[in-house]
Amino acid sequence: MLRSSVALSARGYGVLRYAPTNLLLNAIRTRRGLKWGVPAMLLAVPYLCAAAICTTIINDGGPGWFHLLVLLFIWNALKMLWIGPVSLVYLVRCRRQEHVGAADTLGHAGRLSLA
């Protein structure tokens, strides 16, 4: 049972790796993309609106499989809301490392020229 669950999870990851939101999150996690984390949080609004629309359709007698769409939309909205603060933390960390690296490089160059 555990083996089949792990195999299903691995196949699911292989397929969902190319989902549009996952591709966007992977692009934001790069050094060049970290600045787009906070604006990407705005993408949560359309996902939440789509979830609300699907919920209204379900309440008005729509098909039950719309529950899966609601879960998908809410999950994607949470991912978009999550990437904003996380990208800010990563951006601060990268900038600090770059600043320390630049100061360290200048410090070594200064010491070498004085000797």
Image (cartoon, rainbow, N blue to C red):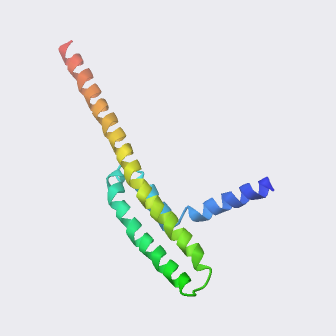
Count of numbered badges drawn on the protein:
0
Query: Where is residue 103 shown, x and y percent of the image?
Result: 25, 28
Query: Where is residue 63 shown, x and y percent of the image?
Result: 60, 85
Q: Residue furthest bottom?
A: 61
Q: With 89 as the anchor, is 76 left or right in this view?
A: right
The residue at 37%/60% (across/down) is 41
- Could one spot residue 112 in this view of the protein? yes
Q: Residue furthest left?
A: 114
Query: Where is residue 40 shown, x and y percent of the image?
Result: 36, 61
Q: Is residue 111 above or below residue 97?
A: above
Q: Is residue 90 above or below residue 65?
A: above
Q: Residue furthest front?
A: 59
The residue at 19%/18% (across/down) is 113
The residue at 61%/59% (across/down) is 13
Relative to the observer, which residue lies in front, 5 or 115?
5
Q: With 115 as the anchor, is 52 left or right in this view?
A: right
Image-quadrant location for residue 62: bottom right
Query: Where is residue 68 shown, x and y percent of the image?
Result: 59, 73
Q: Quadrant of the N terminus?
A: bottom right
Q: Quadrant of the C terminus?
A: top left
The residue at 47%/59% (across/down) is 79
Q: With 36 as the anchor, is 50 left or right in this view?
A: right
Q: Residue furthest top?
A: 115
- Could one spot residue 27 in this view of the protein? no
Q: Is residue 62 above or below residue 47?
A: below
